[in-house]
Image (cartoon, rainbow, N blue to C red):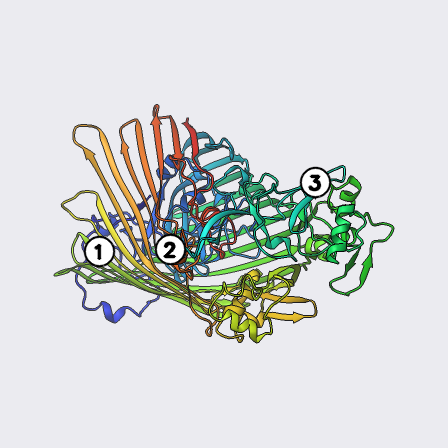
């Protein structure tokens, strides 16, 4: 990986006084336009990421970080998403380690600057790639085979004016090999240090010229398969680490909160209940089974909810929180590609890119569970004598809690089919202008099979004797077809058959078609150089459909989850123009001075007309130093899901934050708001909640105003050294998003008054709370920081050893969120997933046959919650952390090489602070794994042979 640097071999520009008067002019392309000078024609003109104009240098006014094919090979990665996530500018998004409970398992998506993967545009050869998640713009970068990649450019800045919508936080541009010749085969084996998470990968690539050298074709075929990693196998993750009140807090030098290991009282497959405040189960012979030994304590004071009680996690009768979780999902992926280019006429090239990707993955979570919040009937038929005595003593039915593993783990099987075809023509006019025409069509189909679902109605009738239809309020009793369930014993097969729903399948499909045309070149020569330009037009059509399963359509499954079909489409027509104007050349303090500008107008069928623009300045005071700056406006129109998502609903529990145990744990306003609603002492710590989720056809486009400024320094007195520093600032307004349903009620009660965006989404119904979760234009998301990069290569004299040092670091200075103009700004800099400092440094030593690399990844200190007072906690922050990776590449001969790479060489575990021990993710990200490695040490061994 390296920071792209200047090409100092470029011919010097000349001084221009006239440049400022022609910056706003885009003359028509004319036959008599001046030809490129002979000197300029001798220089290579190339495409670079960040500009539509071909250039002779390789650096734009916006920073670009690159991975080469060699970088990819030597890290042993077979999923470029994992490599990209090591960049300090990237926050881990969906991947094999992050998608078990977040939907669409097995896909790898990128998230620049932590603004969301929908705001990072993924390109292949400068063109859009068909999205992998229907209804969105998100691309599965693991669907792009590493063997075909020439390099990966990451443009860290708003680029909507250059590449179109979705490039709000930046662009990942993957450049494929164009004229690969020969046959190359590789195979790799990967495993964790615990010998799980195994991954096998095999690939074959063949390329050859044809038509007497006027054409070239290559074929690629690869297959990979990987195993899951269960969370309970990593004790440092699955240990139920939490903060508790310090029983010795009144003693001198003691803090209020300390860490402890606590499991919820319901976390057991031995369904339990309370007798005089102590948990018991029932043995198969009907006798009582104490769940705690004498002297072991139940923590908590609730007598109405088992879920509010905990025990020490060391008790073997109880599970840890992640007993049923996964740290990595399994995946099978088949990838077939055909790339062709041919000169079909003098100066006219035709190219075609065809691909097909088949992916299978799965997610698995917990089986059916009861959390001990709803009492059994007082006349429950399966009570033992001891239980009936407790019912008589208390005057109410027993609470019970526990898992039902005999029902099987709930989850989904995912089956993806993706194909895309790109056809393009490219040529030069008589005036040396390049013209390009391309048409592409892609489609993604996803089949999702729900596994081990159960009937909510049958469950409630079998256990409580009756079920109230949530829509009609009709009461249905346990009739002759019902199978009553003894919750204190393993479920009988008859009960399982009655409760369990056969696997049911939903489907979704997305199609995308794009037509693009562009023209670029040099308009005319100015005294300081040639005025470069690019103009073009694009038309894109997208359509998404989704069909819930019959069970989901009828709301028959767990929590009565109910969904409706979705069908939505939009089309957008865009026109863009880009100018590159040399202003000064070869004068005092101006080796060169160049102004860049771009404008794009996009007319959406759904969101009207939006404009994006960029203004950039490149200034080289000397041959050694470049100073660059850019200001841009990027726009993103709402996608199909955000507009058209059909209404879905499910029932769940929402914490009653006004409950005695929680009312003092929120903001300074919580208690007053609770009192204002008359919730001085609620009886329950939870509320039944109906969660209704939908799209919003009234959404408008979100806008991001970005600034980037920095310098590139390459001193002449030190060969092959480049230093860069760039300041960046992104201010996203009218941000499109939803509010996490579980956070709506707490944020409502924690705001300065009850008149806020969160409370507006709540309807209080008779016996339950309704949360209306739709996509909204939220207020603001602002983040800024400084990126640093170093690239230094040198040789040891008379040794044949070449050394290199490459480093990328980022210092985040601000990360503020605001959901509503009237809401307080939430500062999240330094919270989980967003440390102030992140960095990656690689040192390599290379001889003719051997390359040794050592890479260090740095993650700065993080805290679970900035609102906490550090003085109140025994452990407040994670502290700073380094991961070390070691790589060894041996080249047997010109044809065969072997590569060994060990990630997390020391087997470093996650920091043992609540929230960080499970990976360090934030609640915004919605999954377990974050910046920290949850898998431990990881090995990769690969062999490559070229014929």
Using the image as rendered, state which of residue 782 and residue 344 is in the foreground.
782
| CA distance for labels 3 and 2 | 50 Å
Q: Nearer the viewer, mark 2 or mark 1?
A: 2
Counting residues from the start of the chain, the first of labels 3 and 1 encountered is: 3
Query: Which SS class for mark 2?
Result: loop
Residue underneath mark 2? 252
The percent coordinates of residue 543 (x first, y second) are: 59, 58
Residue 943 falls in image quadrant: top left
Position of 270 compared to 381: left or right? left
Q: Is residue 322 visible?
A: yes
| CA distance for labels 2 and 1 | 58 Å
| CA distance for labels 3 and 1 | 66 Å
The percent coordinates of residue 711 (x first, y second) are: 24, 56
Position of 380 compared to 185: left or right? right
Residue underneath mark 1? 626
Q: Is residue 368 visible?
A: no
Using the image as rendered, state which of residue 431 and residue 56 is in the foreground.
56
Residue 834 falls in image quadrant: bottom left
Task: Give me the disc on residue 645.
Answer: none
Q: Nearer the viewer, mark 3 or mark 2?
A: 2
Counting residues from the start of the chain, the first of labels 3 and 2 encountered is: 2
The percent coordinates of residue 367 (x first, y second) are: 65, 45
Q: Work out which residue is located at the far top of the displayed protein and give it.
A: 892
Graded by Cα atoms within 10 Å as few (under 14), some (14 to 19) or many (20 or more), the crowding at tag 2 reads few
Task: Give me the disc on residue 406.
Answer: 3
Q: Is residue 583 shown above or below 324?
A: below
Position of 910 compared to 676: left or right? left
Query: Which SS class for mark 1?
Result: strand
Q: Nearer the viewer, mark 3 or mark 1?
A: 3
């Amino acid at each position: 990986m390296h920071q792209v640097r200047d090409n100092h071999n470029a011919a010097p520009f000349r001084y221009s006084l006239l440049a400022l008067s022609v910056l706003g002019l885009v003359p028509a392309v004319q036959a008599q336009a001046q030809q490129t000078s002979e000197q300029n024609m001798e220089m290579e003109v190339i495409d670079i990421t960040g500009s539509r104009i071909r250039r002779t240098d390789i650096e734009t006014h916006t920073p670009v970080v690159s991975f080469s094919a060699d970088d990819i090979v030597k890290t042993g990665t077979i999923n470029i998403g994992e490599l990209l996530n090591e960049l300090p500018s990237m926050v881990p998004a969906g991947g094999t380690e992050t998608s078990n409970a977040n939907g669409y398992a097995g896909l790898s998506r990128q998230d620049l600057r932590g603004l969301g993967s929908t705001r990072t545009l993924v390109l292949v050869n400068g063109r859009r790639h068909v999205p992998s998640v229907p209804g969105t713009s998100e691309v599965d970068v693991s669907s792009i085979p590493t063997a075909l990649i020439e390099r990966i450019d990451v443009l860290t800045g708003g680029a909507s004016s250059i590449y179109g919508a979705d490039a709000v936080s930046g662009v990942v541009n993957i450049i494929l090999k164009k004229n690969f010749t020969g046959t190359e085969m590789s195979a790799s084996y990967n495993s964790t240090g615990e010998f799980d998470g195994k991954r096998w990968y095999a690939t074959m690539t063949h390329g050859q010229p044809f038509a007497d050298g006027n054409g070239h074709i290559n074929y690629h075929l690869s297959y990979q398969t990987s195993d899951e990693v269960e969370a309970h196998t990593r004790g440092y993750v699955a240990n139920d680490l939490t903060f508790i009140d310090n029983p010795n807090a009144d003693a001198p030098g003691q803090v209020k909160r300390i860490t402890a290991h606590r499991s919820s009282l319901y976390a057991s497959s031995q369904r339990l209940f309370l007798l005089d405040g102590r948990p018991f189960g029932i043995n198969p012979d009907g006798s009582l089974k104490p769940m705690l030994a004498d002297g072991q304590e139940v923590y908590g004071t609730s007598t109405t909810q088992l879920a509010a009680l905990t025990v020490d996690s060391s008790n073997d009768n109880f599970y840890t929180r992640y007993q049923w979780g996964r740290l990595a999902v399994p995946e099978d992926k088949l990838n077939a590609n055909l790339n062709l280019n041919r000169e079909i006429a003098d100066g006219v090239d035709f190219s075609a890119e065809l691909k097909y990707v088949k992916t299978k993955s799965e997610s698995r979570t917990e089986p059916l569970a009861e959390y001990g919040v709803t009492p059994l009937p007082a006349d429950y038929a399966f009570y033992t004598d001891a239980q009936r005595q407790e019912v008589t003593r208390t005057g109410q039915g027993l609470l019970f809690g526990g898992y039902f593993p005999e029902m099987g783990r709930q989850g989904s099987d995912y089956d993806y089919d993706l194909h895309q075809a790109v056809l393009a023509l490219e040529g030069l006019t008589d005036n040396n202008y390049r013209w390009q025409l391309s048409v592409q069509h892609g489609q993604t189909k996803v089949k999702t099979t729900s596994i081990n679902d159960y009937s909510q109605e049958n469950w409630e009738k079998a256990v409580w004797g009756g079920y109230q239809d949530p829509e009609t309020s009709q009461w249905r009793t346990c009739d002759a077809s019902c199978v009553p369930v003894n919750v204190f014993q393993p479920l009988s097969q008859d009960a399982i058959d009655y409760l369990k729903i056969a696997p049911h399948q939903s489907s979704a499909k997305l199609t995308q078609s794009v037509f693009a045309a562009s023209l670029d070149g040099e308009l005319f020569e100015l005294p300081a150089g040639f005025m470069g330009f690019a103009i073009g037009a694009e038309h894109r059509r997208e359509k998404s459909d989704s069909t819930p399963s019959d069970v989901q359509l009828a709301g028959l499954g767990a929590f009565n989850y109910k969904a409706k079909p979705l069908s939505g489409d939009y089309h957008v027509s865009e026109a863009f123009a880009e100018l590159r104007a040399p202003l000064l050349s070869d004068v005092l303090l101006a080796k060169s001075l160049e102004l860049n500008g771009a404008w794009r107008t996009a007319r959406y069928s759904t969101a009207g007309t939006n404009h994006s623009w960029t203004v950039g300045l490149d200034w080289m005071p000397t041959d050694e130093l470049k100073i660059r700056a850019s200001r841009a406006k990027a726009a993103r129109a709402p996608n199909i899901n955000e507009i058209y998502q059909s209404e879905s609903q499910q029932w769940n529990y929402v914490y009653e934050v006004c409950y005695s145990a929680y009312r003092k744990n929120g903001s300074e306003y919580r208690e007053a708001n609770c009192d204002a609603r008359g919730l001085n002492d609620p009886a329950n710590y939870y509320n039944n909640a109906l969660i209704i989720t939908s799209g919003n056809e009234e959404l408008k486009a979100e806008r991001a105003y970005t600034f980037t400024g920095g310098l590139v320094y390459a001193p002449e007195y030190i060969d092959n050294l480049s230093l860069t520093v760039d300041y960046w600032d992104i201010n996203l307004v009218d941000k499109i998003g939803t509010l996490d349903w579980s956070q709506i009620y707490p944020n409502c009660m924690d705001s300065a008054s009850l008149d806020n965006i969160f409370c507006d989404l709540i309807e209080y119904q008779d016996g339950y709370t309704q949360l209306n979760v739709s996509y909204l234009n939220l207020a603001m998301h602002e983040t800024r920081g400084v990126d640093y990069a170093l690239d230094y290569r040198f040789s040891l004299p008379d040794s044949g050893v070449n050394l290199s040092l490459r480093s990328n670091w980022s210092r985040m200075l601000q990360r503020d969120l605001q959901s509503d103009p009237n809401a307080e700004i939430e500062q999240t800099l330094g919270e989980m997933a967003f440390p102030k400092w992140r960095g990656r440094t690689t040192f390599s030593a290379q001889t003719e046959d051997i390359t040794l690399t050592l890479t260090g990844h740095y993650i700065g200190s993080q805290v679970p919650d900035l609102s906490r007072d550090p003085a109140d906690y025994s452990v407040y922050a994670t502290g700073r952390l380094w991961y070390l990776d070691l790589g060894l590449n041996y080249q047997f001969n010109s044809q065969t090489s072997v590569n060994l790479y060990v990630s997390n060489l020391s087997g470093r575990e996650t920091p043992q602070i609540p929230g960080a021990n499970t990976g360090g993710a934030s609640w915004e990200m919605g999954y377990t794994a974050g910046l920290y490695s949850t898998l431990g040490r990881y090995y990769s061994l690969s062999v490559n042979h070229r014929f």
